[in-house]
Amino acid sequence: MVIDARTPVWTTAKKGGTIKGSVNISFKKLNSKAIAKDPDAVIEILTSKFGVTEQDGIFNFTKAKTLYLFCNGLWCGQSPAAIRALLSLGYPENKLKYYRSGMNAWHSLGLSTVGK
């Protein structure tokens, strides 16, 4: 599953769009502050979108999806913040991938995007 970890405004056509087929789940919904502020919302994302199961506060990542996260580029900390939060919850490291070059490189390579 390809995750655009940027805030929604960055996915608009005016701001350059996003990678076709990616799902926008902002790092603000998947970071340490989000876990502390609204853990139920984070659990909802894990279980409804990422294939994680949860019972009595224990996560099962057996059927969890492999996630490919990206943000704006090498200088951007949005994807790393989301990845650190997922790791802190026990998400398997081998199921987390990071496209470090992000949208900056995507655009410089002339690859296609979609946006509202």
Image: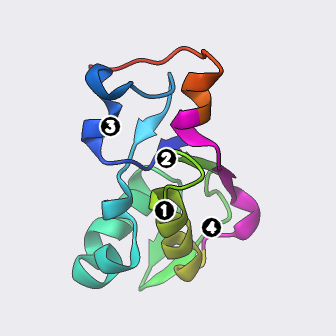
Tell me the CA gap for discs 3 and 2.
9 Å
For this rendering, which residue is in front, 79 or 92?
Answer: 79
Q: Nearer the viewer, mark 4 or mark 1?
A: 1
Quadrant location of the C terminus?
A: top left
Q: Which residue is mark 3?
A: 10
Residue range highlighted in magenta = 91-104
Question: Helix or strand or loop: what does disc 4 sit on?
Answer: loop
How is the rendered protein coloured?
rainbow
Q: Secondary structure at mark 1?
A: loop
x 41%, y 17%: residue: 114
Badge 3 vs badge 2, beta-carbon distance below 8 Å: no
Q: Which residue is mark 1?
A: 77
Under mark 1, the amino acid is Gly
Q: Is residue 72 magenta?
A: no
Disc 3, SS: helix
The local crowd at label 3, few if under 14, some if 14 to 19, many if 20 or more residues have their Cα within 10 Å, is some
Question: Which dot marks residue 71?
Answer: 2
Res. 61 mark: 4
Query: Residue at coordinates 27% horizontally, 67% vertically from top-left?
Result: 41
Q: In the current view of this chain or complex, which residue is farthest to the right?
A: 94
Q: What type is the residue that disc 2 sits on?
A: Cys
Residue 47 x %, y %: 43, 60
Percent position (x, y) of residue 43? 37, 69
Q: Nearer the viewer, mark 2 or mark 4?
A: 2
